[in-house]
Image (cartoon, rainbow, N blue to C red):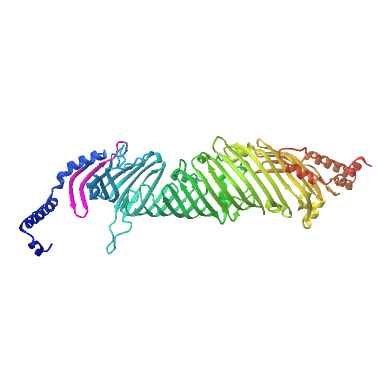
Amino acid sequence: MSARAIGGLGPRWRRALTVVLVIVVALVLAVALFPWDWLRGPINRYVSERTGRHFEITRRLDVDIGWHIRIVADGLVFGNPPWATEPNLIEAERVEAEVRLWPLLTRWRLELPLIAMSQPRLGLELLPDGRRTWTLEREGQEDSAIVVGAMEVDRGQLRYIAQHQGADVQADFAMDAPAAGQGPQLLPLSFRGGGRWHGENFVLEGRSGNVLALREGLGNPLPLEIFATSGRSSLRMAGRVVSLATFDGADLSVAMRGRDLAELYRLVGIALPETPPYTVEGRLQRQGAVWRASELRGTLGRTDLRGEMSYDVSGDKPVLVGSLQSRRLDFDDLAPLIGKREDAPRARRGARPAQGDRQVLPRAPLDLSRLRSMDADVRFAADRVVDAKPVPVDRLSVHVRLQDGLLQLEPLDAGLAGGRLTGSFRVSGRQKPAEFALQLQVRGLNLERLFPAVDLNRASVGQVHGRVALGGRGASVAQMLGSASGDVALLLGRGRISNLLLEFAGLDGAEIVRFLLGRDQRVELRCAAAAFHVKDGLMSSRALVLDTVDTVIYGQGTINLADERLDLIFRPYPKDASILALRSPLKLSGTLGAPEGGIEKGPLVARAAAAIALGAINPLLALAATIETGPGEDADCGAVLKQAATPNKPPPVPAPPVPASAAAARAASGR
């Protein structure tokens, strides 16, 4: 109002306006000069009553009233609820707080958008039922009398306790002043600390913004950098979070490395398989109860990985979902997954194992108790597989599902020896010992690639088809197979196989000498079958036949998976006449890791004695005892393959023809 306008008012209005102006000035002066420290006692009592906790401004109180109310307290103690370990939520040398006036006047609700503290000591604790010391609602109250939005800190200490998480963390933090000539730092608050997380010791350090959002939706996202180590595992994170208390709204770049992914189970609660040393990096985000890891890339041993994962903790049990791919999978990196332990370094893996270390079935116990801690649905595919010994796998894809302790690898699809392996594997951790079921089908396996380490097989050509159906119980792979029951069958149709291999089987000296001096040849393979009925880990042969145009070999015996012992015998019957034939049954014994092959000495000794006796009469007659007239006959390949392919109906072992060495008999009798 202008002076002319005021002058135009009547005397009565001018006096009224003067009184109002005097009152306003008096109020302003009263507020400005009011001894606010006198209110420390009433305020201490009011806050303590409203929150149910001890509250005290210990030294001085001041209030600055403007567009915003600013309260300054020198010395402040704010207690924790009775159930907390630490007595106080806050102890600080100085606290400045902004107050929203309208909620205070209309609802008697004290809203503090920002609290700035100097040299505070913070005691934060979380209980399994969700109660938190930094939430100020009293028990039985749905609405809080005091709402804190964000906290700004400088030089202090923090302790965080969550006994159900195995967590007890302590950290020191301080504000770093900007260097001369530089503006404010993006991450001015540095911190360093450590303690225990999920029962594991760790240390951490990092930087962040100095404003900590305590309530969702309040304050700007907090910039954050963290470096933490626990044992041989390390973690780096950089990015932003909306709420430091819950990590909601997190958007972080993450890099991890460690000795074994399974160790993360103790740190983050995710049940991951045992692995060789790993490195992984990617982008980590959280929205509500769902963590998402995208742009993942890393290595496990010498295997590369890429993909994305999500981890949902909203339900009664966390759920892991994702997809991973590998351009190059080193098969040796899967050894810990199946319970296999290799103490020798990679450079020594080709060395011959010691006699006492030749068991090939993994015997390390599998920790299946973790299967019940979470559910999962993960797909994995490897474009190329290397070092797959002794099984020549060249690619792999599998769908892994885990639900209520039941682990399923289905479908399982792999490239094997130029052919294809498909099937499923299931193991249940719902009971002890664990139960397993294995169903596999193989099609078109190339014989020369199936056993690449066998020199005598390199000249062999053919395709192998087969089936494995096993089930059992156990705490390790060895125990599972040692108790397994079911059927195993491998079938081989027409092809070609190394003649030298057959001549060794028949101990045909003339043929071996000819092939060794010349070039090994291939003979036509009519059929082959190896079928076993399995009961409680004992594999009993139902059909063991290899038939070529040159030789037919019949076998029978057992393979004991419980102790890995071999007890097989093979009887070769050459189909052509030859001299220097010391044909005798071949016996395969020893263990799976150290097989021992040899001829049965009885028949061989009888032939040798006959040769010596005839040689004493005439050296040329010694050859007569080694002459093989070739009585072997073609096997009925159709019947053999049908018997081998029919499970759970063990047919009688076909009776091989019994040859009569007529020439040797006549020579021995002198006719």
Residue 195 lies in the magenta-colored region: no
Viewer can see residue 645? yes
Q: Picture quarter containing residue 601?
A: top right
Q: Residue at x 40, y 50 (%)?
A: 228
Count of all numbered marks drawn on residues in the image? 0
Q: Which of 496 and 574 is in front in this view?
A: 496
Q: Picture quarter containing residue 267?
A: top left
Please state the extent of the stretch shown in magenta in the rendering: 57-82
Q: Residue 82 location, x and y as percent?
A: 30, 36
Q: Residue 217 location, x and y as percent?
A: 34, 51
Q: Residue at x 21, y 40 (%)?
A: 46
Horizontal placement of 270 versus 380: left or right? left
Q: Residue 365 location, x and y as percent?
A: 55, 39
Q: Residue at x 17, y 49 (%)?
A: 62
Q: Residue 432 location, x and y as percent?
A: 55, 34
In the displayed orientation, state which residue is furthest to the right.
671
Horizontal placement of 127 versus 541: left or right? left
Viewer can see residue 260? no
Q: Looking at the image, is 119 positioned above or below residue 177?
A: above
Q: Which of 468 and 576 is in front in this view?
A: 468
Horizontal placement of 106 versus 579: left or right? left
Q: Residue at x 74, y 45 (%)?
A: 529
Residue 69 lies in the magenta-colored region: yes
